[in-house]
Image (spheres, helix red, strand yellow):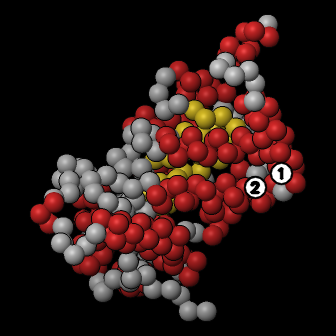
Amino acid sequence: MSAPVPSDGTVAERIRVVRNHLAPAELAVAKVILENYPTGGLVPIVQLATAAEVSAPTVLRLVGKLGFDGYGAFHETLRAEIHQRIFSPVDAYPDAKRQPAAETPAARAQAAYVDCIRSTFSHLDAKELKAAVTALADVSRPVLVMGGRISAILATQLATYLSMLRKDVVHIASDGTERISALVDLRPKTVVVLFDFRHYQQSTLDWGLEAAKRRAHLILVTDQYLSPLASHATTLLTSSTRGLEPFDSMAGGFALTELLISEVARSLGSPARKRLGEFLALQQADEQGSPGMTPIQKGLREK
């Protein structure tokens, strides 16, 4: 089977597409690039080769396998990624004057989101997905889920549905004492799912680094530009954030999260199905309680 030659995507995404087809020396170069991504590759070719303990021709072979015509094109892509990392929604604010008159908003959205989903799943590593599902489906291991200011919505979605399928799933707020107490109780068996998208919230980075130091299984879900936590993750999953201006899109992140939930449910099988049935029955009973009363009011009345 011939090795794929990526024609698009970030350097990190391209590495993930071809890494199972790389020679050991080429993998060493890829590792150096990813360890300090994206600036790790913005060095002279001899310096990169020395850091990876390989020859300069080996670096060039890797660059070719990533779909670049030469080292200059490789550097140009990395520089563009650095610019994208520091982008501001203000700079990307949509201009009504630039929108083609013949293009409808719906058509523009369809094209953007189809591309987002396609990019997310075409760059998804099957081994990384399997490792994440295996860890999350191990009911003997507690699961902590946390996101940043915006990606917290993805963390909430994952934690909510996983808790219907299995025990010991906790959603951690990205601020406050809750995240500190979670670290105190964190053990090597703990599975941590961390959502971190640009601009890579510092409190999330610090929390993730500490979780990695405590030897948790760190599943990092990030964008195509890679969170600085990428080199510390046990399992790395990426989703595209391409969408409509001015903000990054979470559509790819939602699709990836829903895939995780579905695959965990499939892996857990009948015990999770039974738990879900019991959960839904109790939920229905709760919702059919006394009209006009909140769950708190019903609880007070029962006391």
Q: Residues within 10 Å of mark 1 (few under 14, many from 20)?
A: some
**Residue located 53% across and 21% down the image:** 177
The picture quadrant where one finds residue 214 is: top right
Q: Which mark is residue 273?
A: 1
Label for residue 255? none
Q: Position of residue 223 (x, y in %)?
A: 43, 57
Q: Which residue is tagged 2?
A: 265
- Quadrant housing residue 12: bottom left
Q: Nearer the viewer, residue 178 or 67?
A: 178
**Image x and y of residue 241, in percent:** 40, 59
- Viewport quadrant of the N terminus: bottom right
Residue that appears at 83% across and 51% down: 273
Q: Position of residue 276 (x, y in %)?
A: 80, 45
Residue 181 visible in this rendered orientation of the protein: yes
The image shows residue 125, relative to residue 137, as above or below, that is below
Amino acid beneath label 2: Ala
- Up the image or down, 41 lies above or below 223; here it is below
> x and y percent of residue 60 in the render?
36, 83
Q: Is residue 133 above or below residue 282?
A: below
Secondary structure at badge 1 equals: helix
Query: Which residue sits at x=56%, y=24%?
Result: 178
Judged left or right of residue 92, residue 3 is right
Q: Residue 31 or 102: which is nearer the viewer?
A: 102
Question: Observer-nearest residue: 160 or 51?
Answer: 160
Relative to residue 135, is residue 110 drawn left or right?
A: left
CB-based contact (under 8 Å), mark 2 and mark 1: yes
Given the current orientation, which residue lies at the most extreme bottom position? Answer: 1
- Going 58% across and 54% down the picture, which residue do you hit? 257
Question: What element does badge 2 sit on?
Answer: helix
The quadrant holding residue 44 is bottom left
